[in-house]
Amino acid sequence: MVKKSDSFAGRLTDNELANSILESANQIWLAGLGAFATAQEEGSKAFDTFVKEGEHVQTRAKKAAGARLDEVREQVVDTWDKLEDVFEGRVSRALRSLSVPHKRDIDALTKRVAELTAAVEELSGKTATRAKPPAHVAAAAKPKAAKASAAATHS
């Protein structure tokens, strides 16, 4: 802004003073418009810069959150597995204390009955009518039945 001294203003006529004030006001107006245009141009550049920086921050935040989520997920799975093991152990102990046989005990007995039935049928030379054992038990009994019949033949 142009600085005018009081002595200078005193030497000007009213018309010159009005023109000087008008010119100063016009320069102030133009300076304001220039500042506004610069702020608008720089503001749009700043806005674009802020958007780009925001995208980078968001990407980093997503990666960090994803990594943390994976850690938490692993902890939850581990904890759940441990809880499941504890539960299964307690149920198994409770069933044992009530003398309830385990599935593997029943499977072993079923397999043994199938083996004995096969041996008895071979020794008696006839096939008895019986319920068919489960496929996994029958498959396991076949090799032992063959050994039992071979042992009976050699004796």
Image (spheres, rainbow, N blue to C red):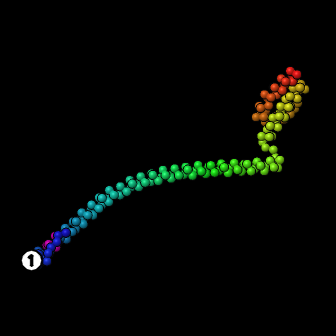
Whether residue 127 appears in this view of the structure is: no
x, y percent for residue 104 = 77, 40
Compared with 93, 132 (above or below) is above
Determine the main secondary structure of the stretch shown in magenta. Answer: helix
x, y percent for residue 143 = 78, 28
| Residue beneath disc 1 | 11
- The quarter holding residue 140 reads top right
Callout 1 secondary element = helix
* Residue at 80% over, 47% down: 96
Residue furthest top in the image? 154
Q: In which quadrant will I find the C terminus?
A: top right
Residue furthest right in the image? 124
* Residue at 22% over, 65% down: 31
Residue 2 horizontal side relative to residue 131, left or right: left
x, y percent for residue 55 = 41, 53
Whether 34 is among the magenta residues is no
Badge 1: how crowded within 10 Å, few (<14), some, or many (20+)? few
- The quarter holding residue 121 reads top right
Compared with 26, 48 (above or below) is above
Whether residue 81 appears in this view of the structure is: yes
x, y percent for residue 149 = 84, 25
Q: In which quadrant will I find the N terminus?
A: bottom left
Residue 129 horizontal side relative to residue 69, left or right: right
Please give the range of residues in magenta: 19-23
Near-viewer residue (38 or 147): 147
Residue 62 horizontal side relative to residue 84, left or right: left
Compared with 93, 119 (above or below) is above
Q: How many marks?
A: 1
* Amino acid type of the residue tagged 1 in the rendering: Arg
* Residue at 83% over, 34% down: 112
* Residue at 78% over, 34% down: 137
